[in-house]
Image (cartoon, grey):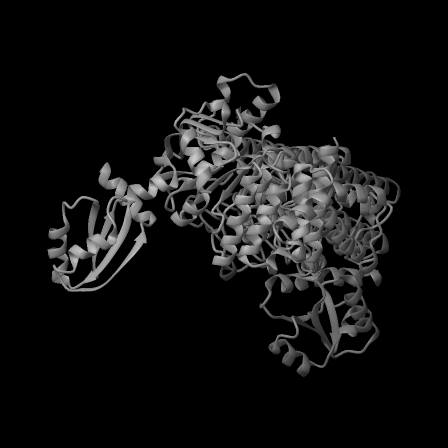
């Protein structure tokens, strides 16, 4: 994983030509009834990688995916998928794309096998029975093949949806919120399937509002907020931008004292006062233990903990850089 | 082609599996279809066979005959023979609608030719039903009179059978109910299939696959149509075996049902695409189904509901479906349009609905976010046409065009209905004029025959020497009375003039008696009826101003409300005459016998009237002529 990221970083230094990209957005704007959903988005997604679309609810993630799927059309700008435009009903291109929707879009009254059988007919999969068995095995669903979908758990249903999307061996897999509403175990299972698909050469685009999911899966992350592309970079760069977080719990009067004492120290990006104390965002240049050594003499500390920044804190970091 | 079939087959199979697994839903749909048939047949039963008690205090033969006629004459009655106390109790309890009571002297009075009063008590809970009873009773009495060949009952019913068989109302309703069944069952199944795709968001899956989504929806619609066809077997079987209605043209019936299912399937797809929710689909289908059914000629073989509704009915496929189904089952042509026109219209509906369903579905599938740039690009003609239709029917930016189109359709319907109404009014006026002319001719012919016959008798049988009481006189009197009953006022006046000129009502010869003859409301202005015998005649409301009655016998004549202004009534015998509200302005009553001042006081006007004693009443009244 680490190696692949480095590879990406080294390659990303060279400008990526649109015709060597899996998905290419150029100045894409999308409006729905005069409301701008996506505003002047430009990005290039490389083949054989996992790209994360990160953002809070309403950021425009699903709309961006809909544009790639061809469910919507841009108001302006150009989108190419595998060097082709998705205008109209481009059957050839659609055969290269597999889609997992946020709401799985499965037929509850049909069994897992019947759902896949129906999808196979839509994609005109050759030897459908054989291929269905393959994907069921791939996603460890063989034992639930004859179960009706409505009897499956949320995680299993999501796996069925992924299995359906893989039926026609797509070159590009688009997954909207891959682990929405699934438990931790199922989440990790899904991640491991996606990594496997990537290793097999499939380009994957994942939309999520979990930063940890983006960090665990993606080679590169596009961060959206209110329809604007805030950044498009590697997850490590993104985390570094927000910094690691040191939460210190102290008495109320200690917050002001600590804030004043720690302001201006190199390696501390920002200081936020919280109801229970303060949160410090640190660059990689300073270790938390060093900071704590400075804090203990100033005021009484109840406890402290070190954690990664969450998505809201990442956005706050962007706000502070460019208010 | 294989790919197309693969998608159709896959979608068909998936939908069929889903329908088979939703057994309760399908069973309920079939039950709906069957209950609808019962429901519509109830329209035919409601309002008939009202529970009516017959209480007879007379057990004579005429009473029995009358009760039998009542029972057979009209389907409005469900006669129950009861004693008076029980009948009254039941009427107040609400289990009876009416009580008909035959008095103890019923048979005697009938035998004696006397007038008899029947007491009928009705409740007014359901006025339609009680009205039915009141309408049915006279027809039963007439039937009774005809059966016993009583004089004075003239009913001439002329029935023209257009077909070699009669069709009952319930069988008619049941067949039209099959169209409603097909609409409800098919529309619900296909609308639910499409709405479910939107509700579960599986429509997105169809939109991103290489297969066109419409193809998949078509496959599903074929499955729902197949299920609807199977479901329709139950109501059709009920109609054939339960209601004993065998289709005269079974193949035509099957063809029309399949065509209906195809059209209603498309309507369901369109509704599903518009609503995109399963719950309102059912409500809307029911909401649409009944008005479409009721205004489509379903309740009667012809359009009796007014021209506007009739015109609007043409906008509904159910109208044509009912027309064709009645033709297939009963051989009836219930629409002014011939069956082939209905068939073409139904085919047109099928094509139109397929197109509309496709457009609505396509629009629902891809929610366009930007103004179409397609116009700037070169497109193949079919795609252009497709977009053109979308612009004009669906897209919000063409709402004015759409509104204009709707207004145009409404305007066209109103214009058409008005034209149709005016045509109908003209047609009715023409029909009335033709009927009036025919009646006029008939009466003229009757009168001429009468005059010829009487003239012949005057010449050859020395009629003037006969008396009204003698057989010849009585026969002529009876014939004259019969003739008078068949004539309108104009011809009555002509007949009276003829009688006067031929001296048959002359006071001296007294051949024809006008006793009881009715000249109510007729116009005899300026008539000369000098020295005639008008005893017992009814001239109430007649216009007889400036007429001359000098020396005539006017005993027991009814002049109530008549206009006798400026009439010459000198030296007449007016014993027992009725002169209430009569206009006697400037009339000359000098020498009149049998009328008193007390009677004349009741006259409408005596202004300028010369009274029997020769005195003249003061005042001038404008001539009413």
Residue B119 visible from this viewpoint = yes
Give coordinates of residue A194: x percent, y percent.
53, 45
Question: Residue at coordinates 81% horizontally, 56% vertically from top-left?
Answer: B237
Residue B278 visible from this viewpoint = no
Give coordinates of residue B427: x percent, y percent.
66, 34
Q: How many numbered marks are there?
A: 0
Indicate the quadrant where residue B351 lies. top right
Front position in the image: B257 or B125: B257
Front position in the image: B320 or B106: B320
Residue A289 vs A218, above or below: the answer is: below
Indicate the quadrant where residue B493 lies. top right
Give coordinates of residue A200: x percent, y percent.
58, 39
Front position in the image: B286 or A252: A252
Front position in the image: B479 or B460: B479
Q: Is residue A13 left or right of residue B216?
A: left
Residue that extends furthest to the right in the rendered view of this protein: B460
Q: Is residue B164 left or right of residue A212?
A: right
Give coordinates of residue A246: x percent, y percent.
25, 54
Residue B275 vs A124, above or below: the answer is: below
Question: Residue at coordinates 57% horizontally, 53% vertically from top-left?
Answer: A157
């Amino acid at each position: 994983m680490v190696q692949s990221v480095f590879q990406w970083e080294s390659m990303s230094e060279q400008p990526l030509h649109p015709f060597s990209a899996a998905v290419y957005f150029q100045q894409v704007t999308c409006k729905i009834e005069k409301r701008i959903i996506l505003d002047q988005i430009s990005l290039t997604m490389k083949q054989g990688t996992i790209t994360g679309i990160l953002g809070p609810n309403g950021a425009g993630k699903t709309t961006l995916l809909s544009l790639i799927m061809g469910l919507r059309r841009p108001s302006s700008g150009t989108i190419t998928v595998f060097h082709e435009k998705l205008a109209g009903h481009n059957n050839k291109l659609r055969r290269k794309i597999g889609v997992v929707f946020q709401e799985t879009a499965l037929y509850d009254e049909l069994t897992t096998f019947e759902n896949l059988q129906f999808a196979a007919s839509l994609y005109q999969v050759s030897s459908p029975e054989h291929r269905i068995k393959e994907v069921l095995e791939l996603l460890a669903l063989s034992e639930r093949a004859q179960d009706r979908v409505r009897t499956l758990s949320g995680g299993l249903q999501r796996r069925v949806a992924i299995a359906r999307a893989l039926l026609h061996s797509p070159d590009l897999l688009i997954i909207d919120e891959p682990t929405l509403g699934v438990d931790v175990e199922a989440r990790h299972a899904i991640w491991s399937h996606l990594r496997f698909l990537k290793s097999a050469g499939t380009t994957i685009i994942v939309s999520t509002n979990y930063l940890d999911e983006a960090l665990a899966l993606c080679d590169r992350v596009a961060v959206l907020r209110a329809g604007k592309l805030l950044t498009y970079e590697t997850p490590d760069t993104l985390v570094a931008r927000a910094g690691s977080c040191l939460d210190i719990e102290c008495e109320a009067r200690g917050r002001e004292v600590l804030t004043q004492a720690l302001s201006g120290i190199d390696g501390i990006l920002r200081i936020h006062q919280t109801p229970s104390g303060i949160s410090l965002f640190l660059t990689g240049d300073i270790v938390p233990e060093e900071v704590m050594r400075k804090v203990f003499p100033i005021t009484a500390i109840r406890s402290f903990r070190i954690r990664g920044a969450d998505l809201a804190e990442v956005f706050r970091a962007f706000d502070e850089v460019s208010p | 082609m294989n790919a197309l079939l693969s998608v159709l087959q896959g979608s068909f199979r998936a939908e069929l599996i889903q329908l088979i697994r939703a057994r309760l839903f399908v069973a309920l749909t079939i039950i709906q279809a069957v209950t609808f048939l019962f429901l519509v047949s109830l329209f035919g039963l409601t309002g008939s066979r009202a529970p009516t008690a017959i209480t007879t205090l007379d057990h004579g033969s005429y009473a029995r005959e009358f009760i039998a006629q009542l029972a057979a004459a009209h389907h409005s009655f469900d006669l129950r023979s009861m004693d008076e106390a029980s009948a009254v109790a039941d009427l107040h309890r609400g289990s009876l609608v009416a009580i008909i009571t035959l008095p103890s002297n019923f048979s005697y009075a009938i035998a004696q030719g006397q007038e008899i009063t029947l007491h009928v008590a009705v409740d007014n809970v359901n006025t339609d039903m009680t009205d039915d009873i009141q309408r049915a009773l006279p027809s039963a009495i007439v039937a009774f009179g005809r059966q016993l060949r009583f004089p004075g009952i003239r009913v001439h019913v002329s029935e023209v059978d257009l077909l070699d068989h009669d069709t009952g109302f319930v069988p008619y309703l049941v067949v039209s109910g099959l169209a409603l069944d097909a609409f409800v069952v098919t529309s619900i199944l296909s609308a639910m299939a499409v709405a479910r795709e939107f509700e579960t968001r599986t429509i997105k899956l169809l939109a991103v696959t290489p297969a066109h989504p419409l193809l998949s929806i078509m496959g599903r619609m074929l499955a729902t149509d197949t299920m609807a066809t199977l479901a329709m077997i139950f109501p059709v079987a009920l109609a054939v075996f339960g209601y004993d209605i065998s289709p005269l043209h079974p193949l035509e019936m099957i063809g029309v049902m399949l065509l209906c299912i195809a059209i209603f399937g498309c309507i369901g797809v369109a509704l599903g695409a518009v609503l995109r929710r399963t719950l309102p689909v059912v409500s809307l289908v029911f909401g649409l189904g009944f008005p479409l059914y009721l205004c489509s000629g379903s309740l009667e073989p012809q359009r009796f509901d007014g021209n506007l509704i009739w015109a609007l009915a043409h906008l509904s496929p159910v109208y044509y479906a009912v027309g064709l189904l009645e033709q297939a089952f009963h051989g009836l042509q219930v629409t002014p349009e011939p069956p082939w026109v209905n068939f073409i219209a139904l085919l047109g509906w099928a094509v139109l609905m397929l197109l509309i369903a496709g457009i609505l579905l396509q629009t629902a599938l891809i929610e366009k976010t930007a103004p179409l740039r397609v116009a700037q690009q070169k497109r193949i003609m079919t795609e252009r046409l497709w977009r053109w239709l979308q612009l004009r029917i669906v897209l919000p930016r063409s709402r004015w065009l759409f509104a204009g189109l709707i207004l145009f359709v409404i305007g066209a319907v109103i214009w058409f209905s008005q034209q149709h109404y005016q045509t109908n009014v003209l047609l009715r006026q023409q029909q009335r004029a033709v009927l009036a002319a025919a009646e006029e001719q008939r009466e003229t012919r009757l009168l001429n025959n009468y005059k010829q016959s009487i003239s012949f008798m005057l010449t050859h049988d020395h009629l003037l020497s006969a008396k009204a009481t003698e057989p010849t006189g009585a026969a002529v009197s009876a014939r004259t009375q019969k003739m008078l009953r068949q004539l309108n006022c104009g011809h009555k006046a002509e007949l009276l003039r003829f009688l006067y000129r031929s001296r048959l009502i002359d006071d001296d010869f007294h051949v024809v008696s006008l006793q009881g003859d009715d000249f109510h409301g007729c116009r005899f202005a300026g008539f000369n009826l000098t020295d005639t015998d008008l005893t017992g005649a009814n001239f109430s409301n007649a216009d007889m101003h400036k007429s001359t009655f000098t020396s005539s016998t006017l005993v027991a004549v009814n002049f109530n409300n008549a206009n006798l202004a400026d009439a010459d009534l000198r030296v007449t015998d007016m014993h027992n005459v009725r002169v209430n509200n009569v206009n006697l302005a400037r009339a000359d009553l000098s020498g009149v016998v049998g009328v008193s001042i007390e009677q004349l006081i009741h006259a409408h006007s005596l202004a300028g009237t010369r009274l029997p004693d020769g005195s003249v009443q003061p005042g001038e009244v404008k001539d009413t002529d």
